[in-house]
Image (cartoon, rainbow, N blue to C red):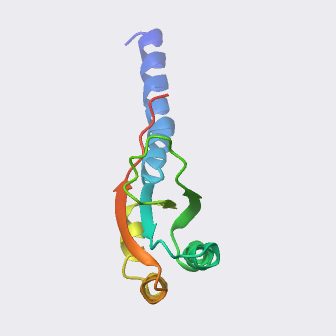
Amino acid sequence: MSRVAALVLTLALGGAVVIGPLVGAAVAQAPSQAVRHVVVFKYKAGATPAQIQKVTDAFRALATSIPGITAFEDGVNNSPEGLNQGFTHVYVLTFTNAAARDAYLPHPEHKKFGQLLGQSGIFDGAFVVDYTPTTTR
């Protein structure tokens, strides 16, 4: 074997020994895909802003009491299209992954929030959509 061929082989094998574990570690440590949990509420016509705020505050508190929630956002529909079908308040929770979302659903604090919502007397309906975000940029 020529000296050049031996040197190329040595460098190639050495690179595989050094780089191979780094690539494997990067794949193994890659974060799981986040899951967005979008909840949209319809409140009864007589609901006061203070009553709605109490529900919103209780919902927001779940982000600090249930592991795996990385973000919480809320807002009121302001679309000029008029297609919201009476659903006005949007709550978006971001979970680290689907397993965190799945653990949230039966969590005692989430169930407690559901009881508060039901007992509030202002809740008129909800719809929920979960998705894993993708980006195009």
Say if 114 sits above or below 73 in the image: below
Q: Nearer the viewer, residue 22 or 11?
A: 22
Q: Residue at x 62, y 74 (%)?
A: 53
Residue 18 visible at all: yes
Q: Nearer the viewer, residue 21 or 128?
A: 128
Location of residue 65 by image quarter: bottom right
Query: Exactly how many numbered labels are in the figure?
Result: 0
Say whether residue 89 is left or right of residue 2. Answer: right
Q: Is 110 left, or right, of 61 in this rendering?
A: left
Residue drawn at (47%, 12%) of the image: 3
Q: Nearer the viewer, residue 47 or 31?
A: 47
Whether 101 is drawn above or below 119: the answer is above
- Measuring 44% from the left and 40% from the top, which residue is drawn there? 81
How far across and how far down the image is residue 37, in percent? 42, 60
Which of 120/24 is in front?
Answer: 120
Q: Is residue 14 above or below residue 60?
A: above
Name the image quarter holding the N terminus: top left
Name the residue rendered at 58%, 72% in the picture: 56
* 83 to 125, vertically: above or below: above
Percent coordinates x, y for residue 118 in the rendering: 42, 85
In the picture as drawn, the residue positioned furthest to the front comes out as 46
Q: Position of residue 86 (x, y in %)?
A: 41, 60
Residue 71 percent location from the top left of the image: 58, 61
Q: Let me know if residue 95 appears in the view.
A: no
60 left or right of 42 in image: right
